Image (cartoon, rainbow, N blue to C red):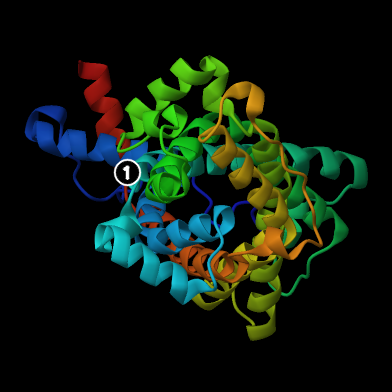
Amino acid sequence: MPERDPYPLDPTSPTTPASQPRATPLQVSAWTLRSEQAKKWTKRYRTEVAASSSSILSTFAAYPLDSVKTRMQVYKFRNFPDCVRHTYRTEGVHGFWRGVWSPLLSITLVRTVSFSIYQRAKYTYDDWIHKATGKSPLVIANTQGAYPTLSTITCFGAAGATAGATITAIACPFELTKLSAQIAILNAEKAVKGNTVIESYQQQGTFRTARALIRNRGLAGLYCGFYYHLLRDSIGTGVYFMTYESCKQLLANARGNSPTSPQAVVVAGGLCGLVSWACIYPIDSAKSIYQRNCLTSHPGDTITPKIQFFNPRMYRGLGVSMGRSCVVNAIFFSAFEAIKKRINHFEVDEQLIKAASASS
């Protein structure tokens, strides 16, 4: 029967051949010992290491598209090129990366935590489903030639929704400060002269923006739009992982490959972003509009927008967002799977580490 994890590890088995003479702790350098310990740690936390590294790469590469998407959501432009021209004319090239440091930190943290939670949640749900039905969704998903079933879709979707709901508490303040940086110039252009609320957020970094939010709205100000964010991330992350895992399995089987083949990963990575954004975009637009309103008005005057799934206004910037998501996730998952595979091929001298620990 195939393993549940496509990259099974056996941390108790030595990786150095028994016939090869083994150096004693006194015969090896401290650098060699630290190197073996670092490899062991990296293999143990391979999901988190791969997720954080891939997130930095994909976030920085596609950030200009995210910046344009946000501007189109909260203010009216004729089309994508009009928004790009306006941003370049008023803010220069730097404007497309305005506020990038906050999401580099937050998205990397959020994705690392999200993938860690997702990995643990999917094994938990797999155990529950296995006990209830006698079949393991993860075994089915990692079996060459098998196709998605109701149990695999349920397992991946539930694990994704769990991860999305959990990381909202971390992500919301960071995303709010990022949005503030992205639309700061536009807010200033549209503002009535003397609007002290807007002025308090102008030309502020992440931490100064956070302080201004607390000063204007109290500690709860950091979580403006939290309920929109929770709804978006619970549904979106569930759809995201469900689509990724199912598409990866289908595409791999169509070519007779492993579910982790590079071609399947790239296409499934692009598709999962497209499908999830198509499902949650009006929620994201309502969140962005509400957070914009919080950044331009006093607490008692803030207008709360409705989530309208068939209102064209709520879909402004959808094409940009889907294009960005396709690029981000294709880069992210390709790097994620490649890094994870590379880490799992590390050879760790377990006996050397044990001998060093025993002699210390």
- Inspect the image, locate mark 1, and give the three-letter code of the amino acid beneath it: Trp
Where is residue 132? Give x, y as percent. Answer: 91, 41
Image-based side of 355 in relation to 309, left or right: left
Few, some or many residues within 10 Å of mark 1 (<14, 14–19, 20+): some
| Residue furthest front as drawn | 193
Where is residue 188? Give x, y as percent. Answer: 40, 45
**Secondary structure found at label 1:** helix
Image-based side of 110 in relation to 353, left or right: right
> Label 1, on which residue?
101
Q: Which of the image's four quarters has the C terminus?
A: top left
Image-based side of 332 in relation to 305, left or right: left
- Residue ID at (27%, 31%): 353
Looking at the rendering, which quadrant does residue 196 occupy? top left
Above-or-below relation of 34 to 104:
above
Above-or-below relation of 128 to 64:
above
Above-or-below relation of 260 to 160:
below
Q: Would residue 142 be visible to someone looking at this image?
A: no
- Of residues 2 and 296, the one drawn nearer to the viewer in this rendering: 296
- Residue ID at (63%, 40%): 290
| Residue furthest right as drawn | 133
